[in-house]
Image (spheres, helix red, strand yellow):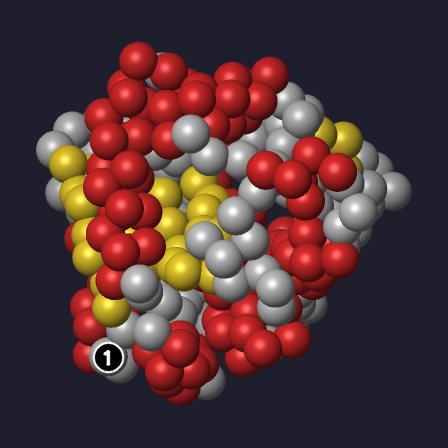
C-alpha cells in the first residue's frame, strides 16, 4: 500500500501521447514530424538568427521501427550531405563547420549519431563535424532520479510518459538501462572515448522545470569524466520543449547557440 507521501501518477500515458492501442496490437497515433509546422518555424527562426543552413531530418518511428532505426536514418542523412549534388548546398554550405543538433528525442539521436560519426569522421569528409548540440536531450534509466520524482505529474512530460516511450522504442527485451536510453549503462561510457579523441565540442542545454534535467546533468558529468570537451547551459523554470512551443523563448537559446558555435569553430582554427 502506498503512503500518503508517495507521488500519485494521475493520468494515462497512452492518452497523453494521443496513442490508441488497437485490438490487433497496432497503434494509431498523432505524431509530429520534422516537417510539422512547429518544428519548421523553430528551424527557420534558428537559421535566420544563426545565419546557418539547417538540414532538418525526418526518421522512422517506433514501435514499427525500433531503435537503432532512427540512428541509422541520422547517419544516412550525414552521408547524403557528404555526397549531395544539391547546387545550393554545394555553393553556400560550409562543409568544414558542421554541428549535429537535436531537441528532446532529437537530442538523443544527435548524441547517438555523434558517437557513430566520431568513429567514421574520416569517411564523412569533406563533411567536418565540429561539435554536438544536445537541446533538452531525451535520456532515461531504470531507477528514477530526483527531478523525475519531483515532477512526476508534469503536464508536458510526466515520467510515466517517458517510460512508455522507451518501452515502445527500445529493442524488444531491453529495459531502460540500455545504453540507447541511459548513456552510463553498458558500453555507453566506453563509446565516449572516441568522442573525446576527435576533440569535438559538446553543448548540453536544459531547464529545471523539465523532469529530465537530472538525466541531462548526469550526462554532462559523464562526458567530463571521459575527457569530452563539454559545456552546459541550464536555466531555472520553464518546461520540456519550451523553446519549440514558445518561439519568443527560443531567442535566448539562439544566443547561447551562437556563442557556442563561434567558440567551437574558433578553437579549431
Residue beneath disc 1: 227
Residue drawn at 26 percent across, 56 percent down: 266
Quarter of the view holding residue 39: top right
Position of residue 30 in the picture relative to residue 167 (left or right): right
Q: Residue at x 65, y 75 (%)?
A: 123
**In the image, residue 153 lies at what x, y percent?**
31, 32
Camera-side residue: 189 or 17?
Answer: 189
Mark 1 residue crowding within 10 angstroms, few (<14) / some (14–19) / many (20+): some
Residue 70 visible, this orientation: no
Position of 205 with respect to 113 (left or right) is: left
Could you tell me if residue 30 is visible in this image?
yes
Q: Does residue 99 sit above or below 248 in this rendering? A: below
Q: Position of residue 173 (x, y in %)?
A: 64, 72
Q: Is residue 116 above or below residue 212?
A: below
| Picture residue at 37% right of the left edge, 16% below the top | 247
Say what secondary structure mark 1 lies in. Answer: loop
Most extreme residue toward the right, as rendered? 24
- Residue in view at x 15 percent, y 36 percent: 235
Amino acid at each position: 500500500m502506498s503512503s500518503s507521501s508517495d507521488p500519485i501518477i494521475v493520468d494515462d500515458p497512452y492518452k497523453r501521447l494521443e496513442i490508441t492501442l488497437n485490438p490487433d496490437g497496432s497503434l494509431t497515433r498523432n505524431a509530429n514530424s520534422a516537417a510539422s509546422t512547429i518544428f519548421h518555424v523553430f528551424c527557420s527562426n534558428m537559421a535566420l538568427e544563426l545565419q546557418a543552413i539547417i538540414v532538418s531530418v525526418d526518421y522512422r518511428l517506433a514501435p514499427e521501427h525500433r531503435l537503432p532505426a532512427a540512428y541509422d536514418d541520422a547517419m544516412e542523412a550525414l552521408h547524403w550531405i557528404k555526397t549531395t549534388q544539391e547546387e545550393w548546398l554545394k555553393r553556400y554550405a560550409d562543409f568544414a563547420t558542421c554541428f549535429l543538433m537535436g531537441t528532446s528525442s532529437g537530442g538523443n539521436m544527435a548524441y547517438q549519431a555523434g558517437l557513430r560519426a566520431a568513429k567514421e569522421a574520416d569517411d564523412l569528409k569533406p563533411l567536418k563535424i565540429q561539435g554536438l548540440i544536445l537541446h533538452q536531450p531525451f535520456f532515461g534509466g531504470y531507477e528514477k532520479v530526483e527531478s523525475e520524482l519531483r515532477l512526476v505529474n508534469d503536464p508536458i512530460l510526466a515520467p510515466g510518459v517517458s517510460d512508455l516511450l522507451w518501452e515502445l522504442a527500445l529493442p524488444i527485451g531491453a529495459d531502460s538501462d540500455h545504453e540507447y536510453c541511459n548513456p552510463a549503462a553498458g558500453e555507453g561510457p566506453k563509446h565516449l572515448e572516441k568522442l573525446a579523441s576527435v576533440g569535438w565540442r559538446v553543448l548540453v542545454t536544459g531547464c529545471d522545470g523539465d523532469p529530465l534535467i537530472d538525466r541531462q546533468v548526469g550526462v554532462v558529468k559523464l562526458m567530463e569524466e571521459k575527457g569530452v570537451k563539454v559545456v552546459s547551459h541550464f536555466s531555472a523554470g520553464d518546461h520540456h520543449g519550451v523553446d519549440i512551443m514558445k518561439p519568443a523563448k527560443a531567442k535566448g537559446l539562439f544566443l547561447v547557440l551562437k556563442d557556442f558555435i563561434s567558440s567551437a569553430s574558433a578553437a579549431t582554427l
